[in-house]
């Protein structure tokens, strides 16, 4: 069996299929050696520390946001929980039942509710009244109106979290522009809307970032899961950091989950040396130029466009399609990221490629299809290797934090790029092993991070609150005993 690095694989295919040497010149732009990946890792390591700092976080490209999630599941969680998942034009309401004895989610019912355009652009009160009404309808259907259940709230918009149950909306994205919400606590707005109805109540609320939900949903199945990673339309990661290093939150004992927001890595120019001219065009033509640099190099929203730009250049240089392009290929966004996965399929990839290119209106021969396949392979490979460098940085940080010679940990992972691409997960895992040999990482695909994960965050928060109350009660009893003994001594 031949085992190649991504660069060796490119050279091998170029040689076997007699591709022009000029094609190699372009593909080499996307190759990152192991040494270069280690450099990238060292830069991210510095950014993680800067983001955690009390006085340096405001200028950090990697924001390192405290989530106030202070533990992962320990397997004792049980009970009934509600979950709300709001992040687009639809939102979900869920009822999750967790059974401790079997360490599994026994039941999960959900309902999808649409958010009309007029509500997305209306007032905050209208939005939260709509959410509260849909939640009421769901509770009726589940016969849960008489119960006061805790709720996990996955709210996928930029927020500054102040506590587990307090989260301030920084700005709307994804087509929302509800007035009177930015700068306010979304948990409070939800509670006020429910109170206005008066026909049901909810218990404690836990705010959940989708990456944290990914980690927590996997953490219930595997208690060594302390990292969450999403690599889909966008990308992000979270992990359990030592509290003594989280300078923006008081207290030094224990750990806290940090939402890295690693998509912003490189926004300060630290990745400029590995950005290609095609990456620069993708950034400049995006809706948010200059931000989310790392995300634009590795996530599903942008990979297809990077491929398209390179195919256009190869065609202009008469290295593809006999130099004849098409209106479709020249249209931004026409080469979807899912095409990359379809073209890289082992058995059907070349046939898929022929069909996709025909639909894009270009005349291609078998060599053209193989070149396109190699372009897809090169760009998805770079994505996996960059992702591996970032993930390895986090795993190694956990190892060093704990003073371990060797770390065994699990990563809860989600996202269409990881799930759907035929080679991505394997290349990611192989590269992580090369970069951080002192870390043994198991990968666990998340099952519904925003549903089960939100329930788990809520369940763990309840468990910790109960432990804290029991500890306070115990301390109170000890003080009473001491006072009684002092009285007797008198």
Image (cartoon, grey):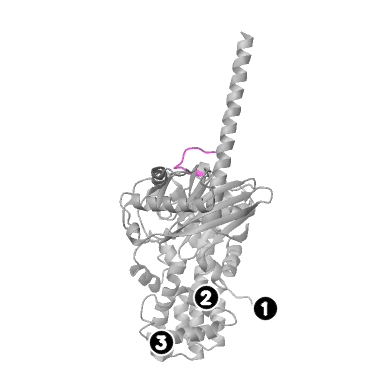
Query: Which sits earlier in the primary sequence, circle 1 or circle 3?
Result: 1
| Residue 449 appearing in the image | no
Between 406 and 234, the residue placed more toward the observer is 234
Whole-Å distance between the Cαs marked 1 and 3? 38 Å
Query: Which sits earlier in the primary sequence, circle 2 or circle 1?
Result: 1
Q: Residue at x 57, y 46 (%)?
A: 459
User: Which disc, if any, is residue 361?
Assistant: 3
Residue 423: percent from the left, percent from the top?
57, 72
Q: Nearer the viewer, mark 2 or mark 1?
A: 2
User: Which disc, if any, is residue 341?
Assistant: 2
Q: Nearer the viewer, mark 1 or mark 3?
A: 3
**Badge 2: few (under 14), some or many (20 or more) residues near its Cα, within 10 Å?**
many
Q: Quadrant of the N terminus?
A: bottom right
| Residue 134 appearing in the image | yes
Query: Which sits earlier in the primary sequence, circle 2 or circle 3?
Result: 2
Between 193 and 42, the residue placed more toward the observer is 193
Contact check, label 1 and label 3, Cβ < 8 Å? no
Residue 223: percent from the left, percent from the top?
63, 51
Secondary structure, magenta segment, majority class = loop
Whole-Å distance between the Cαs marked 2 and 3? 20 Å
Secondary structure under badge 3? Answer: loop
Contact check, label 2 and label 3, Cβ < 8 Å? no
Residue at image mark 1: 1
């Amino acid at each position: 069996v031949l085992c190649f690095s991504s660069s060796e694989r490119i050279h091998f295919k170029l040689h076997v299929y007699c591709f022009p040497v000029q094609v190699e010149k372009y593909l080499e732009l996307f190759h990152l050696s192991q040494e270069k990946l280690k450099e990238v890792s060292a830069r991210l390591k510095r950014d993680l520390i800067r983001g955690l700092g009390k006085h340096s976080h405001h200028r950090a490209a990697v924001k390192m946001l405290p989530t106030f999630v202070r533990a992962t599941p320990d397997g004792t969680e049980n009970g009934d929980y509600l979950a709300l998942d709001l992040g687009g034009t639809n939102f979900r309401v869920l009822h999750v039942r967790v059974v401790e004895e079997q360490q599994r989610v026994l039941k999960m019912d959900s309902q999808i509710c649409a958010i009309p355009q007029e509500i997305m652009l209306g007032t905050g009160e209208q939005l939260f009244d709509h959410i509260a009404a849909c939640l009421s309808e769901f509770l009726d259907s589940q016969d849960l109106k008489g119960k006061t259940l805790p709720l996990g709230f996955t709210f996928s918009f930029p927020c500054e979290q102040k506590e587990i149950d307090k989260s301030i909306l920084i700005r709307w994205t994804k087509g929302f522009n509800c007035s009177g919400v930015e700068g306010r606590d979304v948990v409070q707005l939800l509670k006020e809307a429910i109170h206005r109805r008066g026909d049901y109540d909810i218990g404690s609320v836990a705010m959940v970032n989708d990456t944290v939900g990914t980690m927590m949903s996997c953490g219930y199945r595997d208690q060594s899961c302390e990292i969450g990673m999403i690599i889909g339309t966008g990308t992000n990661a979270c992990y359990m950091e030592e509290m003594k290093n989280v300078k923006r939150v008081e207290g030094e004992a224990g750990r806290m989950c940090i939402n890295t927001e690693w998509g912003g890595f490189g926004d300060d120019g630290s990745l400029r040396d590995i950005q290609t001219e095609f990456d620069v065009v993708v950034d400049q033509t995006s809706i948010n130029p200059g931000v989310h640099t790392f995300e634009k190099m590795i996530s599903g929203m942008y990979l297809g466009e990077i491929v398209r730009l390179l195919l256009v250049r190869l065609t202009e240089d008469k290295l593809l399609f006999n130099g004849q392009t098409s209106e479709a290929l020249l249209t931004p966004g026409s080469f979807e990221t899912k095409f990359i996965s379809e073209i890289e399929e082992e058995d059907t990839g070349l046939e898929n490629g022929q069909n996709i290119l025909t639909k894009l209106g270009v005349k291609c021969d078998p060599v053209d299809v193989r070149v396109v396949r190699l372009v897809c392979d090169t760009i998805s490979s770079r994505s996996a290797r960059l992702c591996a460098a970032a993930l390895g940085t986090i795993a190694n940080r956990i190892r060093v934090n704990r003073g371990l010679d060797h770390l065994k940990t699990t990563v809860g992972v989600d996202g269409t790029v990881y799930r759907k691409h035929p080679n991505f997960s394997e290349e990611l895992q192989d590269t992580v092993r090369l970069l951080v040999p002192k870390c043994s990482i198991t990968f666990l695909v998340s099952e519904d991070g925003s549903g089960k994960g939100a329930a788990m965050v809520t369940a763990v928060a309840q468990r910790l609150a109960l432990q804290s109350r029991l500890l306070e009660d115990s301390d109170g009893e000890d003080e009473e005993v001491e006072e009684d003994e002092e009285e007797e001594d008198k």
